[in-house]
Amino acid sequence: MPPQGQAKSTWVLYETDVINDEAEVPVTVPPTAERRKWQLVWRNIILFGFLHIGAVYGAYLFLFKAMWKTCAFAIFLYLCSGLGITAGAHRLWAHKSYKVRLPLGILLTIFHTIAFQDAVVDWARDHRMHHKYSETDADPHNATRGSFFSHIGWLLVRKHPQIKAKGHTIDMSDLKADPVLRFQKKYCLTLMPLACFVLPTYIPMLWGESLWNAFFVAAIFRYVWVLNVTWLVNSAAHLWGNKPYDKHINPVEIKPVSLVVLGEGFHNYHHTFPWDYKTAELGDCTLNFSKIFIDFTSKVGWAYDLKTVSTDVIQKRVKRTGDGSHALWGEDDKD
Ligand code: ST9
Ligand code: ZN
Ligand code: ZN
């Protein structure tokens, strides 16, 4: 019986329960999403509401009114701030999947500041919790609470007490010791509005764009776009797709998402092998812009110690826990 007060419809697996690879039917455990009232944070609801209305208008200006240079600049900022999240906050700082020299550390911090997704140390702490306590109440965007919650809802309500209670089990000393990240955290409330809104509005006016178009296209629309594609990894990539590497977990491979999230849509792979800097097996060039960026910075000597997973380990894992959708199964059939 599920403990009292817990949702009966959501059944997920704890990692420790997936011990018998031969088992046809996975072992089920009580649901991990406690049914609880959402404690709404109206400040965020109103802010995100206005931002999204502004972004729809910004999308219209992007498509029909703004100068092409302004549109190109918005796309450039999307790619830079996106890399600040993918190559920076996610692969470098949250997972330590590669190392960087100081210039790249500073560049990625600037890119991350443009993205305005809170300080790197807070972003990485929540993300380390997401991996360690995946799909439980201690996961900040626990996908078993529904797609809306895991997409944006988690930023509109007070955090579950388990998040704060279990937060102390996450070692953040590595990032707290980084002087660049300490600087970002200390001044983030000034730096982020400046990098995300003020400069992106000012710069297009240098080539004659109106303040209005610059603000709604390069600042608001671009910001809300990057937020939403980031959140897709928490929502869609925990819901719809194949599980070639581990069928016992919720994260999936979702290629269309990968294109817009610069290579982060191979989420079943990523949750199975979180230390791989590629966050994907094949590193498909068109779908993994972040890998291309890290490979390039590695060639010029700014990134090093790139961690990955051997083909042998991947293949064994595919055979042991995959759902059968991996190309490897087809190859076996040919033999
Ligand atoms: C944003 C982040 O959007 C998005 C992250 C997405 C991650 C996706 C990952 C997917 C993989 C990567 C794919 C990337 C793809 C990118 C593609 C790009 C092209 N442990 O927070 P408070 C403490 S941000 C330990 O106020 P409330 C905390 O330190 C958007 N402790 O909780 C504090 O203590 P103290 C912009 C923790 O009141 C106390 O608890 N930002 C932890 O419940 C209270 O903390 C926003 O909109 C922890 N994990 O409020 C801000 N967590 O007081 C949104 C907290 O001593 N956030 N603590 O300092 C908020 O307004 C609030 O946090 C809240 C909760 C309302 C959500
Ligand atoms: Zn995930
Ligand atoms: Zn991750």
Image (cartoon, rainbow, N blue to C red):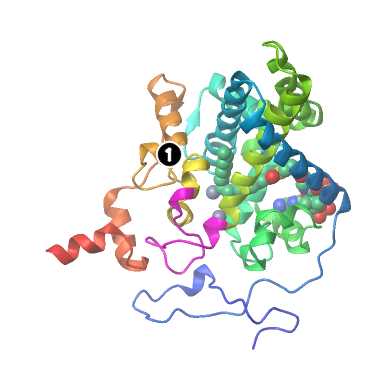
The answer to whether residue 330 is above or below residue 81 is below
Front one among 225 and 172: 225
Q: Quadrant of residue 304?
A: top left
Q: Residue at x 63, y 39 (%)?
A: 226
- In the image, residue 133 lies at what x, y percent? 61, 61
- In magenta, the rendered stretch is 236-256
Q: Can residue 113 be seen here?
A: no
Q: Residue at x 62, y 49 (%)?
A: 231
Q: Quadrant of residue 328?
A: bottom left
Quadrant of the image containing the C terminus? bottom left
Q: Ligand 2 appears in which quadrant?
A: bottom right
Q: Can residue 105 be seen here?
A: yes
Task: Point out the residue furthest to the right here.
Answer: 42
Q: Quadrant of residue 121?
A: top right
The answer to whether residue 131 is above or below residue 87 is below
- In the image, residue 251 lies at what x, y percent? 50, 60
Is 35 left, or right, of 77 in this rendering?
right
The answer to whether residue 9 is above or below residue 122 is below
**Secondary structure mostly seen in the magenta stretch:** loop
Is 226 left, or right, of 279 in this rendering?
right
- In the image, residue 147 lies at what x, y percent? 63, 62
Q: Residues within 10 Å of mark 1 (few under 14, many from 20)?
A: many
Quadrant of the image containing the N terminus? bottom right
The answer to whether residue 177 is above or below residue 231 is above
Q: Which residue is mark 1?
A: 288
Give yes or no for residue 288 being in the magenta stretch: no
- In the image, residue 47 lies at what x, y percent? 83, 44
The secondary element bearing badge 1 is classed as: loop
Task: Point out the residue furthest to the left here.
Answer: 335
Residue type indicated by callout 1: Asn
Q: Residue at x 75, y 60 (%)?
A: 165
